[in-house]
Each structure stands twice: as C-alpha cells, then as structure tokens.
Image (cartoon, rainbow, N blue to C red):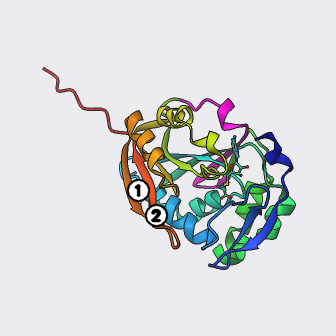
Amino acid sequence: MLYLRRMKREFVKTDDGSMTIYLPDLDENYHSTHGAIQEAEHVFIKHGLKAIDSSERMNVSVFEVGYGTGLNALLSLKHNPHVFLTYDAIEAYPVTRDETDKLRYCELIGEKYQKHYDVMTRCPWGRKESISYGMTLTKIHKKLQDYSLEKGKYDIIYFDAFGPRAQSEMWEIEILQKMYEGLADGGVLVTYCAKGQFKRDLKSLGFEVESLPGPPGKREMTRAWKPEKEEIDEI
Ligand SMILES: C[S@@+](CC[C@H](N)C(=O)[O-])C[C@H]1O[C@@H](n2cnc3c(N)ncnc32)[C@H](O)[C@@H]1O
C-alpha cells in the first residue's frame, strides 16, 4: 500500500456536521459518513475508553492503529474518565497540519480543546509529549507491520484501520496476534468492523468477542477482551 502516501485526499462533511477525509482512489473514508464524531464517540470512547475500570489504579494506556486526523485522541482527552492516560498511536501516512486545520473539529468538540489539538498536531513524531495534566501522546511514524508492541503494555486498543475491503493486509491474523500480545490481561480491543471472518480470527487467538450495536448507520461493531489470567490457588 505504498501508494497510499500519494493518494488524493478530499474533505467531506458527514451527517453529524463533522468533517472527514475521503480517498477517491480507494473509495474509503477516514470515518463514517453517518457522523465522524458520533462514530468515534460510540465505538472508541463509549465502548473502549469507558469500558475499562481504573478505580484501583492511576494510569490507563491506549494504543491506536491509524492516528489519521487525531480525532480519536482528541475525543479521548475530552472524555477521559481515568486519572492519567498514556496514549500511543501509530500512523504510516500522516495527515498534514494544513489538512487537519481544514477539519475544524474543535468548533464542534469545544473551542477550549483547540490548544490541545494544536499540540497534538504539531508535536514531533517518536517522542512522548504532554498534552494536558492527564494525558501524554506518543505518535509513532511507522507501518504497523514493521512495529512491535511492548508485550502486555496496553489496556485498550483502538483498531481504526481502513476497512478490510480497502486494506485487507491490516486485518490479517498476524496483525491481530500482535494486538493480542500488546494487550494487558483483561485489556480490550475495539473497532467499528463487524465482519464474520475478523471475529472468527479474534476468537481463534483467544479473545472473548462481543458484537455490540454499532454507531448510527451501522448495525454492529466489535469488542474483544483478552482474558484475565486464571488465578491459581496456592496450596
Ligand atoms: C480509518 S483511518 C484512521 C482514522 C483516524 N483514527 C482518525 O481519527 O482520523 C486509517 C488510518 O490508518 C493509516 N494506515 C494505513 N496503513 C497503515 C499501516 N500499514 N500502518 C499504520 N497506519 C496505517 C492511514 O493512513 C489512516 O490514517
């Protein structure tokens, strides 16, 4: 998919008034055309970020596949229910600053978040940056295929790759295995995708898979848990 870097990007308004990017060559959008913000809040925030219980610890860590515009990171900052969020995101083909400026997300999400979004957009790749008192962001400029996640590091994975029709290599079982290994026990992977083969692959890796109602315009989404290690009774 090297040619992704050079693909034309168009800016389109989705049904909730928020913008997304459309790639005509792939006939693929960065977000749902039924509502970019609505989809992100439903799939990644409600069923991902807020599904983890952090009542007995300070830090929760997120790994995002496909940082793109930074919308999921920005919404995670806005809705974070945890004391501290460590947010790492990988992206092979970064969206430029000029492009993110056209999206005007903070007009809908809240003008007070503009300064945080500016830091997110402008901060260098490959360095941990403080975005607010409660959140750090590390943007990783790499292809997911060439990156190894630290084993057991993450509580939540936002799996936000382009869909299997447009980019099947992102949904291969080797990639999903990498996700499984990167999750902590009891950690969760969330995605908008609800394809049968994808769910069967997750199950074969040991995930406990849930089909949940999708965001507006989509019947289902997927949430997959890495089981807690069974406690072994001491004799
Ligand atoms: C559906 S979009 C992500 C949207 C993003 N989460 C957002 O909120 O804007 C998929 C993203 O995956 C990125 N991508 C494509 N191939 C990749 C790869 N091999 N490794 C990492 N990122 C990749 C694309 O450039 C794109 O930004």
What residue is rendered at 31% in x and 32% in y?
229
Q: Is residue 184 left or right of residue 125?
A: left
What residue is rendered at 57% in x and 64% in y?
40
Amino acid type at mark 2: Lys
What residue is rendered at 68% in x and 72% in y?
112
Q: Determine which of the numbered discs, if any, sits on residue 51 in the image.
A: 1
Q: Is residue 148 above or below residue 78?
A: above
Which label's residue is closer to the chain start, 2 or 1?
A: 2
Question: Label 1 near label 2: C-beta < 8 Å?
Answer: yes
178 vs 185, nearest the viewer: 178
Q: Determine which of the numbered discs, if any, sits on residue 46 in the image.
A: 2
Q: Which residues lie in the magenta part?
A: 131-150
Callout 1: 10 Å neighbours few (<14), some, many (20+)?
some
What residue is rendered at 37% in x and 35% in y?
206
Amino acid type at mark 1: Ala
32 vs 46, nearest the viewer: 32
The x, y position of residue 205, in whole percent, is 41, 34
Asked which secondary structure carries label 2, the reply is: helix
Is 133 included in the stretch rendered in magenta?
yes
Is 70 included in the stretch rendered in magenta?
no
Outermost residue, top side: 235
The x, y position of residue 54, in whole percent, is 40, 51
Q: Is residue 195 left or right of residue 66?
A: left
Q: Is residue 124 left or right of residue 184?
A: right
217 vs 84, nearest the viewer: 217
The x, y position of residue 163, in whole percent, is 61, 52
